């Protein structure tokens, strides 16, 4: 993880600035507040601010149900009910703001989640540091033969060495040339006084997609859960999943009841289509249903069996 | 303002629950937190929770500009710059949650603002109290002759008496019949054991549009400013403007620098079209331009003159 | 269904105006275009315009997958795959615009779907017709005892007569008084020249929630499916479900492949939580699992059994 | 402009497929439909589909105003009124879908507009062509000294040659190494059978930010205007402005009345703050107000003078 000395000082200052509030606070999240959690080789995710907790979800749901909810005495039960029935608005009542440092190609996946607010470091305005993502050898995988958008086997040592050398060389050269193009008195290593520097908004196009960027990213709990459902999933690309997994730890600290309900009803759940449900009923009646007899496609049948913990 | 004893107890409890936090707090807003501010005859608006302050706007903008902003030393200046140039994302980094009690016809205008989260009291689930909005006499106005969607002169005493008597009688009868339709053992005044009560989700259709409802409404600062720009405007219907004005007081307590910039660059600003700018240049050159000479339509010309503080 | 003579003329005119286009058209939807489909006693839904078809979904998905999709030869299979895996953006590429006439209390549920565009008839500006929803006797139900937000048994004849008489009388009186308050020369039955009419934006508050309003409502196919999943569901209030069911007919005409996939993977599907999946595996292994042995709550267990077509 | 032979065939086929429709069509836009309009060195923008026209804006506005708009006889006047008063929903009733080919660093700016639907070519799934943006010499500018995020003077021939050689060499090497990492039998120039190819989702990180990508981008007219207001502005980076300018041509063909109103009331308009309006009134009264006397900041004063067509 690379935190600049300037950021380090900011974090220290923020961790020392305590205040008294009439808002609800979450001690387990306060313990993490401002602190960067390391992700990938130079990335991090840290919580900058938050609003609400498990009780805020319950409180919002009870406004809707009014006097009617007097009987629903237990918070955990209500949160589980809301999660099971995909009620979304009570979860929208909580918000969280992260500071994230991440490679540009990950940022490009991440930004597809539109229901969030973003302030990204601007390379039109400032100069990007010489930091780029190089995967650890255990994350260097061959193209999957079965799944066009997936990874297959891990590369062997020689293959990995070739890949890493290539990635490193190209990223380093691209960044060195970026600085040369900028020809910036303060930042370029050997500024050439005979030549004007290229505008920053142009020079940045020379950088590779594994260059690190950073942003503030704020969203509400409902949209965070949606993000995590997609990005903590086994089919997500490892590099964004690494961020999602750190954010799951943060979620557990922030809203432990919602977190557990999310694991049970979302991350660990499976959706069965009408045709799958028909097959399931035959199976429960004792029938042994093969794929051709099921009426399901091959891929669908194997997804179905996987959800049931069976071999296809 | 009508706060139920149950709500009163909740507010008291919330105001006594203090916690220490590493988040930034705003003392002036903490002083208002949870307390209902009266609006119209039975309505209120109160802040339930918030995230961020003026410094959070600045902090987010500085992430974008990176090292480049070292020179912009003054927060107020940066916030004014952001407001003037309609930068939106730094303002999205702050969030606020309100509890609002409001007449249904106001709620129907309010909900058109889509970039917000809402949990409304559900009349499918619970029974609505016998509370409806009756305008104060000084807010009872005749239909405007000039503006099809506006108010004209204030009604005289006799006219107002007729209106209020009608509104009151119809609302009271509709609510009494609502309770009779519900035929609820606990809530209806004279439940008839020989008859089953109508489902709540149906009975509610008998209520009039001035019946009060309530909701939690959460939005970010950018969208709040947009709401206030439209709803605190002189052309907004008085009843929703009354809420917007209370929320402006809250804004002033929460983010005083953004509030002042908002007054200067949004609420108090005027947009001049390309044709208006051409007329303006002629005027500045000393020409006296009448409406026919201006090339502007009559209505547009008079809007233009009004923005310049002149008579059309 | 009540279509004004003015609207009738508009519809006729629109149905006669043919044009040649290079856009893809859907003959089955063209046959319905502009025509109102009756809903409830005075309501309707009609398609005003649309963009895209099943092929547009496929085309958008293939842009994403690029050369990689050459092998996915079959459109239906690809659409089913997208639906099963909850890919959303290809469905967003189709759009549809409806003209809907609906009671205000239904409009209040409908508007909660934020990802849509709305132009509603403005009662600040114009005068609402004397039309209100009165349920057919078979839709008048008692409050459910089991489900606080549901309907129970159908009312008997005497109970229904009481309800209908009440609803009708109150709605008629409220509308008559609305006209009296407006005191509009053209629209009020007995305008009183001695009194000024109340502003429209105020008078409307006297109307009951079953008064009909109308709007243009435009959304994309993804958000339409989300709307239909919630509103065509058996737990939705009958009155909004009646609209959703008509819109399902429209969906079948517009995008027949997406429609069938939607029935199979969304409307007819069931989501099983991690704890449910564990119970299911025990059941498939031949175990007879009762609710207490399942570890599931009572309500959850009965939902689970219902999804499996078994009695709890 | 680089259109693949495959795309060329698709365009031809689409331009030959005519159908009869009851929807409103726009002949001037039909003439452009499907055809790519060239942008930058290899990019393009082309309209794939659309819904609505100027008349649809008017029709939606008239639903809101109901009988009240009978008098507003002229469509252009109503559209100008809506634009001047920033009414947004009638403009949301029109939609348009583009196919765009653009450099990744431009895509990263573009995607910040969240109210749109996107299907982007996936480099997880498919292999990106060897195409990257190299600015024309007249667009190679030095960093601005005055504006940290702007361009200054155009580079001279020698400076430009250095920049272009650097950009070209690095982009070519990065793409060649990308193909070597992929080691794809069909696509890599010299596949090495002794080595497994790196997963596509990883190999792509070696590409530079000027590599071209492509996507389908759909939005409504209101959000398109917002995009154009920001991106056709003189302060927008030239590379995205080049797309916005092409889209302005499309706008003029599609909705000529809205286009003209947009030029007058948005692109060509200026917003004057409350303090500016106070200065303006003094100026109109004949006073000669200097910056120090104005109470405005230096930058604000010079923006103000620029809007008035005066020197600061």
Image (spheres, coloured by chain):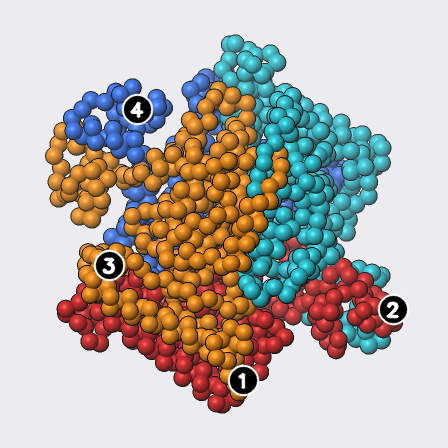
Chain colours: A cyan, B orange, C red, D blue
Q: CA distance from mark 3 to mark 4?
A: 41 Å
Residue B19 placement: quadrant: top right
Q: Are marks 3 and 2 on the same chain?
A: no
Residue lying at the far top in this picture: please name it: A193
Residue holding disc 3:
B141
Task: Look at 22% across and 76% down and name the residue there.
Answer: C189
Question: Which numbered disc covers residue C285?
Answer: 2
Q: CA distance from mark 1 to mark 4?
A: 75 Å
* Label 2 with label 1: CB-CB less than 8 Å: no
- Which label lies toward us, 4 or 2? 4
Q: CA distance from mark 3 to mark 2?
A: 74 Å
Q: Are marks 2 and 1 on the same chain?
A: no
Q: CA distance from mark 4 to mark 2?
A: 82 Å
* Label 4 with label 2: CB-CB less than 8 Å: no
- Which label lies toward us, 3 or 2? 3
Answer few, some or many: residues within 10 Å of disc 2's Cα (few below 14, many 20 plus, some between 14 and 19).
few
Residue holding disc 4:
D295
Task: Look at 45% across and 45% down and name the residue there.
Answer: B223
User: Can residue A48 be seen here?
Assistant: no
Q: Viewed as shown, does residue D129 lie left or right of B48?
A: right
**Quick one: quadrant of the C terminus of chain B?**
top left
Residue C93, placed above or below residue C181 = above
Foreground pick, D134 / B284: B284
Q: Chain of mark 2?
A: C
Residue C86, placed above or below residue C261 = above
């Amino acid at each position: 993880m690379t935190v600049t000395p300037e950021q380090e000082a900011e974090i220290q200052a923020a961790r020392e600035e305590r205040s008294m509030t009439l808002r609800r606070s979450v001690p387990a999240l306060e313990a993490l507040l401002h602190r960067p959690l390391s992700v990938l080789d130079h990335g991090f995710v840290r919580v900058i601010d938050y609003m609400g907790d498990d009780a805020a979800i319950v409180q919002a749901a009870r406004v809707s149900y009014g006097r009617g909810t007097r009987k629903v005495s237990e918070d955990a039960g209500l949160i589980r009910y809301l999660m099971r029935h995909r009620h979304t608005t009570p979860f929208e009542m909580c918000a969280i703001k992260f500071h994230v440092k991440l490679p540009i190609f990950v940022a490009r996946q991440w930004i597809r989640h539109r229901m969030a607010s973003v302030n990204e470091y601007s390379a039109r305005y400032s100069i990007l540091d010489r930091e780029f993502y190089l995967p650890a050898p255990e994350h260097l995988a061959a193209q999957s033969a079965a799944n066009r958008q997936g990874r297959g086997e891990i590369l062997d040592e020689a293959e990995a060495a070739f890949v890493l050398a290539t990635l490193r060389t190209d990223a380093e050269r691209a960044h060195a040339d970026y600085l040369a193009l900028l020809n910036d008195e303060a930042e370029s290593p050997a500024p050439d006084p005979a030549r004007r520097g290229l505008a920053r908004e142009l020079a940045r196009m020379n950088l590779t997609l594994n260059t690190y960027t950073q942003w503030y990213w704020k969203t509400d709990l409902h949209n965070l859960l949606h993000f995590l459902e997609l990005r903590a999933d086994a089919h997500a690309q490892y590099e964004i999943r690494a961020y999602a997994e750190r954010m799951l730890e943060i979620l557990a600290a922030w809203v432990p009841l919602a977190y557990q309900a999310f694991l049970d009803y979302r991350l660990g759940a499976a959706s069965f289509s009408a045709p799958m449900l028909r097959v399931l009923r035959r199976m429960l009646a004792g029938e042994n249903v093969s794929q051709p007899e099921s009426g399901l496609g091959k891929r669908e049948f194997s997804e179905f069996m996987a959800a049931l913990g069976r071999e296809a």
